[in-house]
Image (cartoon, rainbow, N blue to C red):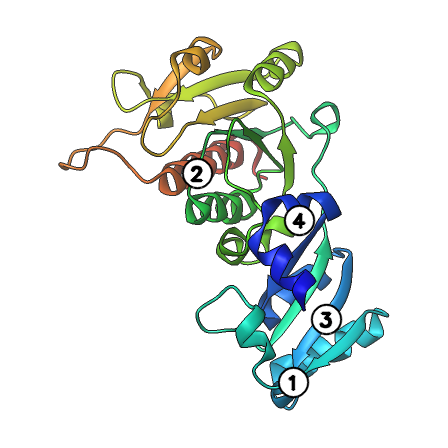
Amino acid sequence: MRRLRRLLAKRSERWAEGVCVIEGPDLVSAAFDARAAIDALYVDRDARGGPEVARVIERARDEGVAVFDLAPGVLERVADAATPQPVLATVQFSTEELTRAALDGLVLVLDNLRDPGNLGTIIRSADAAGVRTIILSGDCVDPYNPKTLRATAGAIFRVSLVEASLDAATTHLRARGVRSYATVLRGATPYQDCDLRGPCAVLIGNESAGLSEDALARCDARMTIEMVGTAESLNAGVAASLIAFEALRQRRATTDV
C-alpha cells in the first residue's frame, strides 16, 4: 500500500514509473474501454457485492488484470478523495511525441496552467468536441494527479497529451503550417470570427497571469471571448471549452462532419 500512497501523493513517483492511480468504478471502466494498460485492480472487500464493483472485477478478470482484495479501512488510508471509492487501479501512461502528434484539427496549447480542475475540464471538453491533441508547456499541473484524473471523467484516456516547451511547440506548429491564436481578455478578434475549420492551435495561459509577452509574440493572431457582464475574465476551463466547441461548430458547418 505504500506504493499506492506514493503514486497518489507525488508527481515524481508517477512519472518515474509511468504509472498513475485511478479511483472509482466509472473511471476504471473508462480506462478499460479505452484499452489503457491497467496493471492491477484493488477492491475494498466489503464492496465486492455492489453491481458496479462486480462489473469492474469481471472486466478485470476477462482482461487478465490482477485483482487484489483490501481489508476494510485500507482504502480510507490510501485514497486521495475525502470519500474513498471502493476500487482503485494502477494504470500505465505515456505522453505523445510532439513530432507524432495529430495536428489536423484544433490543437489546444496550455501554458503554465496550474489548476487541476481546469485541466481536467479542458481534457474532458476537448474529448467531447473532437480535439485530438493537447500540448502542455511550461509549469503545467500534472495531468495524472488524482484531482485532474477525476475531473477528466475518463477522457484522459482518449486524448493525446504532449509535453513540450513553448518554443518547441510553437516552432513545430509553424513549421507544419498550423495557424496559432493567443487568447487575450480584450481588444482582439472575437473567437467566433476566427477561422478554426482547419489545422489551428489556440494558446491558453495561466489562470491568473494569462499568456506571457513571449507567448503572445509567438502567435499569428489573437482572439478574445467577448463578455457583457462585470466578470473580469472566464475560467480557463470554460474558455477552452467554448473555443473547442466553436471549432466543432465551424467544421460541421463546412464539412457536415
Question: Which mark is on residue 14?
Answer: 4
Q: Amino acid at mark 1?
A: Ala
Quarter occupied by the N terminus? bottom right
* Residue under numbered circle 2: 114
Q: Amino acid at mark 3?
A: Leu
How packed mark 2 is, by other alpha carbons closer than 10 Å (few <14, some 14-19, many 20 or more), is: some
| Label 4 crowd (10 A; few <14 / some 14-19 / many >=20) | many
Nearest-to-viewer mark from 1 and 2? 1
Q: Against 198, is 6 above or below? A: below
The answer to whether residue 159 is seen in the rendering is: yes
Give the residue at x 66% y 10%: 175
Determine contact: label 1, label 2, CB under 8 Å.
Answer: no
| Residue carrying label 1 | 71
Q: Residue at x 46, y 24 (%)?
A: 203
Q: In this figure, which residue is indicated by the disc labeled 3? A: 41
Mark 1 and mark 4: span between their CA atoms? 25 Å
Q: Earlier in the sequence, mark 3 or mark 4?
A: 4
